[in-house]
Amino acid sequence: MATVPTAMHAPSLDLQGMAALFGEQSKVYGFIVNDIASDLAKDRYSFEDLDEFRLNALDAETGREHAGRVYWTEMLYRAHMASVAAVFRTTRWIQVAIREHEAGSLYGCAAACRSLIESAGDIGLSLGPVAHTLASIKDQVKAEIAGRSSEPGLISKELEDSLIHFTHARKVGKTEEAPDSHKAMQSYKYIDYVDKMKIPGVKELYARFCEIVHPAAESVAVTFVAKDGNWIVDHFNESVVLQDLLAENRSTLSGVVMASYNAPLLILKTLHSFNLFTKLSSLRKYRFDNIPEWNRVAALLHS
């Protein structure tokens, strides 16, 4: 695969800022991101025109081989692109949350953390099964890409739709026609998915962030404090409320960080088996065997 020059401004994470906001356990993801960010920007992706693909696939001699190679190469491209985007999007939201936290901005930090929770649900829902699926069919996929498969064409519409949903889903107009994979879900479905990942208190914390970010009582009440039988404006109360909120929910936020990074990192590790992308050799420094899903994926990769 062709490479491009390393991006000069690859995202990086402030480890102390992560610990202060999301807890000490979150720092490991900061170390990982800082190690791999520049390498994630090195790959190029190209996709064959659909009409050209259909024409080439009809060739009596080479069509079957061509179709399998292009279909699965492009599927792996989609998996890699989605993982890179998930890592970088998560990192950007965390950077914003840290910045707003350090500024003492309740509104800014709540907005960033609220978006991070939604993003985690989107990542988990779309990308959560991808590493396991690819590992379970790795030999067939390698055969398709190498043009030596003797089986009927291997297709995975579910995997394809899941990856397309992550990269292309959007709000579709009522009169607009679009495939289901292109239709964004309502936010509550993403929150429900994060909740199913058994992150304690995540639904309640999300609701609290919404009360702060949206026009609601809490977004107003933070302006005032009671003093000597009167209500007065207290500009420092915003920071106090923020610190109290974070102190009560740090373990929940740590779980959201974990949920945001685990799926794309497991996909990137799985994709090493196909030798199409820049190797993320620094990932070897980190243990993933405390993630149950990785143990299942690793067993498939070594079977």
Image (spheres, grey):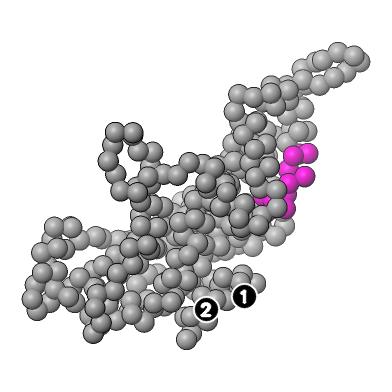
Looking at the image, which residue is at 73% across and 36% down? 242
* 52 sits to left or right of 209: left
Q: Secondary structure at mark 2?
A: helix
* 142 sits to left or right of 32: left
Mark 2 belongs to which amino acid? Ala
- Where does residue 187 sit, x and y in percent of width and height? 51, 41
Within the magenta stretch, is there residue 60?
no
Mark 2 packing: few (<14 Cα in 10 Å), some, or many (20+)?
A: many
- Where does residue 248 sit, x and y in percent of width and height? 77, 45
The mark found on residue 298 in the picture is 2
- Where does residue 290 sit, x and y in percent of width and height? 65, 72
Looking at the image, which residue is at 68% across and 39% down? 102
Main SS of the magenta part reads helix
Q: For the residues marked 2 and 1, what is the alpha-carbon distance in whole angstroms?
A: 9 Å
The mark found on residue 289 in the picture is 1
Residue 67 picture quarter: bottom left
Mark 1 belongs to which amino acid? Asp
Q: Which numbered disc, 2 or 1, marks the residue that appears first in the sequence?
A: 1
Residue 1 picture quarter: bottom left
- Above or below for 248 versus 228: below
Residues rendered magenta in the picture: 243-254
Q: CB atoms at circles 2 and 1 under 8 Å apart?
A: yes
